[in-house]
Structure formats: C-alpha cells, structure tokens
Image (cartoon, rainbow, N blue to C red):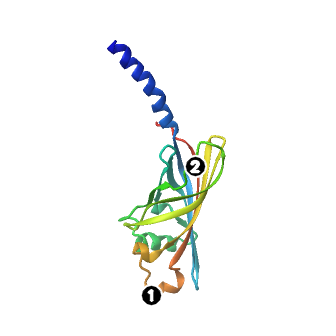
Amino acid sequence: MKKTYWLLLLLLTIPVIESKAQALYAAQNGTVSFFSDAPLEDIEAKSTKAQSIINLSTREIAVKIPIKSFVFENSLMQEHFNENYLESDKFPFATFKGKINENIDLTKEGTYDVSASGKMNIHGVERDQTIKGKLQVLAGKMALDADFTVLLADYKIEIPTLVFQKIAEKIAVKSQFTLLPYVKQ
C-alpha cells in the first residue's frame, strides 16, 4: 500500500515539475542601448549581452547587463564610461529584479502592455523602479521591449563640471529581448 501511494505521488509530481520548467523563458543576448541628449554632445552606447529571465508562473522578471559590454562609437568615451562614471571594475553589472504587475495569462499568444515593479541596481545603488513595456507572445517565444529613463543622480553617478554640458542628467534607455523556453543544461 505504501509503495503504491509513493508511486502515485511521484507520478503526480513529475508533470508539475515539467510544467514549472516550461514556465521559464530566458534571453542570453538581449539588446540594451542608452542615449544622452546633452547641449554639446550626444552620447550613445549599446550592449548585446544583456540577459533576462521571466517566470510565467510567478510573473517574476530579472535582467542582468555587464557594464563593460556597452560599446560606444568613440573608444575614449567607452573608457571614461567604464573607469570614471560607472566604475565597472567595482560595479560590473546593472540589474533589475521585479514582478510583472498585470495579471495576464502570458502563455496565450498576443501583444500585451506590461509594467514591472522591482529593484534596479546601477553603480552599486539599488532603487525602486517601475518599467513599462510591450510583451509579445508568439510561436513559443516572447519579445519584450521597454523604454525608460535613468536619472544619473539617483544612482550616484557624478558628472564633473568640466564635462557637464556633454552628458545629460537623464539617460534614455531602450531594451529588447527575445525570450525562449528555458532548458536547463
């Protein structure tokens, strides 16, 4: 009798484990770019190494971006960005961990306006942030696009007065992720 009970319990558990595994969608090569519109100079950079994961069951989302992966048109700007402003050796990643606010069924195909609230960490400073975006579910994958603004002062990123006219205090950020079902290696 006990063997039958444990076997039945095991068989009932296996589909649950499999469905939870299917509830994860991940992106390894997301694109995140930013643009600084300042009076004397526009600055932009792009990373194609951003990672993201969404748990459909809990609506949790996480994003991790290696700071050194941002590429600038001007290599001197890239050097200053990493060494002087973001201090990427000390703070190698920017992260966001949060939860999608809307209670929608993300397993159904469609395009959804979504927002996620959580903690963003840049330059070692963690702050509450809500990010709005579009999530498209189609053919077994997801496309997530989001645009938001980062205030440098919020993350203690100091701009020397010498270059104050070259770097905006508000940075426009755009992100694009194609998420596929996560398969544990």
Q: Quadrant of residue 146?
A: bottom right
- The residue at 44%/87% (across/down) is 161
- The residue at 32%/15% (across/down) is 2
- The residue at 63%/43% (across/down) is 108
Residue 153 relative to residue 179: left or right: left
Q: Quadrant of the N terminus?
A: top left
Q: Which residue is mark 1?
A: 161
User: How many neighbours does mark 2 have within 10 angstroms: few (below 14), some (14-19), or many (20 or more)?
Assistant: few
User: How many neighbours does mark 1 have within 10 angstroms: few (below 14), some (14-19), or many (20 or more)?
Assistant: few
Q: Position of residue 87 (x, y in %)?
A: 39, 69
Please determine whether, in this image, residue 10 is positioned above or below residue 141: above
Please determine whether, in this image, residue 55 is positioned above or below residue 21: below
Q: Residue flagged by tag 1: what amino acid is it?
A: Thr
Residue 28 relative to residue 1: left or right: right
Q: Which residue is mark 2?
A: 104
Q: Position of residue 160 (x, y in %)?
A: 43, 84
Q: Residue flagged by tag 2: what amino acid is it?
A: Ile
Q: Position of residue 128 (x, y in %)?
A: 43, 65
Residue 113 relative to residue 63: left or right: right
Q: Position of residue 65 (x, y in %)?
A: 47, 58
Kindly state the secondary structure of the residue where label 2 is placed. loop
Q: Nearer the viewer, mark 1 or mark 2?
A: 2
Please determine whether, in this image, residue 78 is positioned above or below residue 27: below
- The residue at 58%/81% (across/down) is 41
Tell which of 117 and 86 is nearer to you. 117
Separation of marks 1 and 2 at Cα, in angstroms: 47 Å
